[in-house]
Image (tube, rainbow, N blue to C red):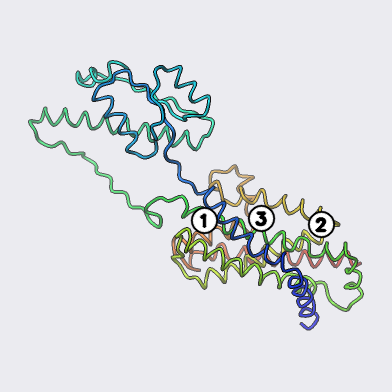
């Protein structure tokens, strides 16, 4: 261990002697979490909407008011024609247009079916799907309300009750806040990015500075060199885990429902896996530019294949199984499980075992690959 401690001491000296880089390493995750936390976890609401009300009576105004009461739509313009609504959507001033026919109230009072048209800008599928779902819900709710009123009248004033009553129960995130789901994912993604970049340049830097040859002639073994390179960055990354968890709890109000000690312990395993992957990149790269490109080649797919943005269950089978080769895939389940659900090892061991095996595997490959380079 004496040789390993010597390498660790050398790496710590490199870190301490560059306070600007150390400050950047500690500040970058917090800054990214604050910026991306507001950008990624934004709830879709207040969709700009234009109205073309040809009826201009009480019933049409009450129907349009139901859209504003959902808070998903925000009234922006009163259009005078359908062509004007199309123009407003083309210019990006509104995303939705509501058109009510001139006989809207007359048909409602007569009990005849009427049509309310909703024109939606489908260029952004997330906004379009939300607008379509809420608009259909408003229309169905209004129809049920009108039919219930009529049937109650036919029943002589007796209340009409639904034969089936749904009582949904939402666990872990009852308010359905998107930020509660995205912030744990952001913590894992930011740590993955930083740990890869921290260690991807470790061996390459020694090679470009000419100090690798000095290490080769020493009696230090390959695994001792790899371990000595990883451990100092583990402490730096571990500090970032604590900082990002504090920001998520006190700034974004995403509290940890499970064991903080368990989360920190499993974060340690993830950091070793991710840092080991960075060391493997460093051993196969000849220059720092190559290491940067290889790191980007892993980081960018990790944002998608790990389940950070898109549920993995909806992915094609090749993409689904490719996610198993990323430590972030397992860590995201652990983060969201402990932070949101408060679960423990009894439910997380299926993620812990492959993540730890992945870390040992990439560390072993790094040692073998570096040993081959020595030969």
Element at label 3? helix
The residue lying at 15 percent from left, 29 percent from top is: 151
Q: Quadrant of residue 103?
A: top left
Element at label 1? helix
The N terminus sits in image quarter: bottom right
What is the CA distance from the residue labelled 2 to the residue labelled 3?
Answer: 24 Å
What residue is shown with label 1? 183
Image spot of residue 38 (x, y percent): 52, 50
Image spot of residue 292 (x, y percent): 77, 54
Image spot of residue 281 (x, y percent): 77, 58
Counting every numbered tag in the picture gives: 3
What is the CA distance from the residue labelled 2 to the residue labelled 1?
Answer: 31 Å
The C terminus sits in image quarter: bottom right
Q: Which mark is residue 288?
A: 2
Depth check, front residue: 234 or 69: 69
What residue is shown with label 3? 325
Q: Earlier in the sequence, mark 1 or mark 3?
A: 1
Compared with 134, 43 (above or below) is below
Label 2: how many Cα within 10 Å (few below 14, some 14–19, many 20+) = some
The residue lying at 71 percent from left, 72 percent from top is: 232
Compared with 332, 164 (above or below) is above
Label 3: how many Cα within 10 Å (few below 14, some 14–19, many 20+) = some
The residue lying at 54 percent from left, 43 percent from top is: 314
């Amino acid at each position: 261990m004496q040789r390993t401690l010597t390498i660790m001491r050398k790496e710590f000296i490199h870190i301490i002697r560059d306070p600007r880089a150390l400050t950047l390493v500690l500040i970058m995750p917090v800054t990214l979490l604050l910026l991306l936390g507001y950008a990624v976890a934004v709830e879709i609401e207040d969709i700009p909407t234009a109205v073309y009300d040809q009826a201009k009576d009480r019933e049409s105004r009450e129907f349009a008011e139901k859209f504003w009461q959902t808070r998903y739509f925000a009234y922006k313009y009163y259009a005078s024609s359908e062509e004007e609504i199309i123009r407003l959507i083309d210019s990006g001033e509104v995303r939705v247009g509501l058109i009510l026919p001139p006989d809207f109230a007359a048909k409602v009072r007569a009990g005849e079916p009427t049509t309310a048209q909703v024109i939606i800008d489908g260029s952004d599928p997330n906004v379009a799907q939300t607008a379509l779902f809420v608009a259909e819900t408003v229309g169905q709710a209004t129809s049920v309300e009108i039919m219930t009123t009529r049937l109650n009248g036919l029943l002589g004033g007796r209340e009409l009750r639904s034969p089936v009553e749904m009582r949904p129960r939402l666990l872990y995130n009852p308010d359905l806040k998107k930020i509660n789901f995205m912030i744990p994912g952001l913590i894992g993604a930011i740590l993955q990015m930083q740990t890869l970049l921290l260690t991807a340049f470790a061996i390459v830097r020694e090679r470009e500075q000419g100090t690798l040859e000095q290490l080769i002639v020493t009696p230090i073994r390959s695994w001792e060199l790899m371990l000595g390179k990883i451990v100092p960055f583990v402490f730096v990354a571990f500090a970032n885990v604590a900082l990002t968890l504090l920001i998520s709890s006190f700034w974004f109000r995403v509290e940890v429902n499970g064991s903080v000690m368990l989360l920190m312990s499993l974060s340690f395993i993830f950091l070793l896996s991710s840092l080991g992957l960075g060391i493997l990149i460093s051993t196969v790269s000849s220059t720092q530019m190559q290491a940067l490109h290889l790191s980007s080649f892993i980081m960018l797919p990790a944002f998608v294949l790990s389940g950070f943005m898109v549920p993995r269950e909806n992915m094609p089978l090749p993409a689904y199984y490719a996610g198993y080769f990323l430590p972030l895939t397992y860590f995201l389940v652990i983060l969201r499980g402990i932070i949101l659900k408060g679960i423990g090892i009894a439910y997380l061991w299926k993620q812990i075992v492959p993540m730890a095996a992945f870390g040992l595997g990439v560390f072993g490959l790094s040692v073998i690959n570096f040993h081959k380079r020595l030969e």
